[in-house]
Image (cartoon, helix red, strand yellow):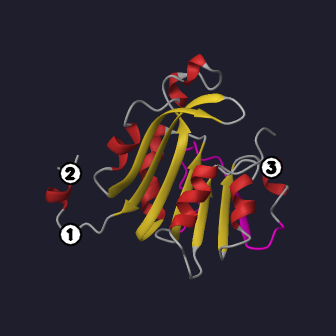
Amino acid sequence: MNNLKPSTWIMNQINALKIRRKINILDFASGNGRHAINLSKNYSMITAIDKDIEKLNLYKNIKNIKTICFDLETNEDWPLEKESFDIIIVTNYLYRPRIKELANFLKKDGFIFYETFAVGNEKYGRPSNPSYLLKNEELIDIFKSTFDIMYYFQGKVINDQISIKQRCSLKKRLLKNRSLLQNKY
């Protein structure tokens, strides 16, 4: 398992909210649980969903973590309750055909913190397949009709190795007048 430490950027986004109440967080495509495990110490309930049962078994018995084994890249309905999460985090995962559906599971005024690889990463290693690399401002383009963009970054990130990442903090917007809001970007 590579990189068991949670993303500093993801953790900083959540900590910056200064949450003082119990919340529900979805760790989408949670993998080895690096975020779910860390977040379970401070927040009320973490739901970790991933297709790898062996990885989920490593942390399924930790207090405040609910694990769901499910292949997120099927046409089946995701086994998640609509509008039930305050925060959704996604790291190092991209499946374009269903990405917009994340909004369905977020409460009004909820947040998505998304961080994954972007075009240019192929120079530094994997992933190098364009299917797994975000294009410039792609997260903004995907979510701009229903979210306010709080933060956006695309560029070189140096941790254990160099990579090209795209990071986006999004806040779900209350849609009162959709036509006015769609022209924001």
Distance from the alpha carbon under mark 3 to that under mark 2: 40 Å
Position of residue 112 in the picture relative to residue 21 (left or right) = left
**Which is more foreground, mark 3 or mark 2?**
2
Residue depicted at x 73% and y 73%: 64
| For residue 135, above or below residue 62 | above
Q: Position of residue 130 (x, y in %)?
A: 51, 23
What residue type is disc 3 on?
Answer: Lys
Range drawn in magenta? 61-81
In the depicted structure, whether residue 139 falls above or below residue 58: above
Q: Is residue 121 left or right of residue 30?
A: left
Q: Label 1: which residue?
A: 176
- Mark nearer the N terminus (1 vs 3): 3
Reading the image, the residue beneath label 3 is: 55
* Earlier residue among tags 2 and 1: 1
Residue 78 makes an appearance in the image = no
Q: Secondary structure at mark 3?
A: helix
Where residue 39 sits: x, y (%)? Answer: 68, 65
Q: Position of residue 1 (x, y in %)?
A: 81, 40
